[in-house]
Amino acid sequence: MSWARIDDDFCANKKTVHLTDSEFRTWMRVLCFCAKQQDPTVDVMARKEIAGLTMQRVTKFASLGLLDEVGTDYEVHDWSRYQPNDKTGADRQAAWRARKKVSLGVT
């Protein structure tokens, strides 16, 4: 399972406030798809896989600055800033859970 990190101000961001509810759901699907693929690329395959992701929506997302045009494809803007490649994340979480169990006296 992968995780998509979002800022706690995500819904009020000057870019996302211009999305309709349907577009917002599609944008969330884009972020989840990219997180699962561990790749910020929005290409033909992504458009086929992501429900509601039409070329019209890709164009709108790009015009709002949510996507960056890269050649014939697009990439999620600032992906590496919000989705750092953290190879130790799972280890850190497991250690935290183990410490939490000990502090709660759970065995």
Image: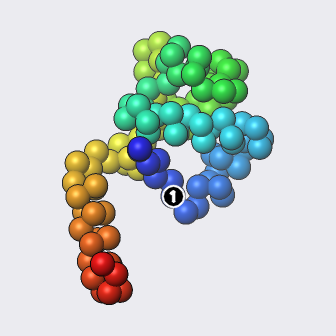
**Residue that sits furthest to the front in the current view:** 107
Q: Is residue 44 left or right of residue 60?
A: left
Q: Position of residue 91 (x, y in %)?
A: 23, 58
Q: Quadrant of the C terminus?
A: bottom left
Tell which of 18 and 107 is nearer to you. Answer: 107
**89 to 52, vertically: above or below:** below
Mark 1 — residue? 7
- Determine whether 101 is above or below 48 in the image: below
Q: Is residue 31 left or right of residue 96?
A: right
Q: Position of residue 92 (x, y in %)?
A: 25, 63
Q: Quadrant of the N terminus?
A: top left
Q: Where residue 40 sits: x, y (%)?
A: 42, 32
Q: Amino acid at mark 1?
A: Asp
Given residues 91 and 12, the one toward you in this image is 91
**Is disc 1 placed on a helix, strand or loop?**
loop
Residue occupying image coordinates x 76% and y 38%: 22
Residue plotted at (59% across, 55% down): 10
Q: Is residue 13 left or right of residue 91?
A: right
User: Neighbour class for label 1 at 10 Å: few (<14), some, many (≥20)?
Assistant: few
Say which quarter of the image contains residue 64: top right
Task: Residue 13 in the image: state x and y as whole percent.
Answer: 62, 54
Give me the residue at 52% from left, 39% from top: 31
Work out whether residue 57 can be spotted.
Answer: no
Q: Is residue 98 visible?
A: yes
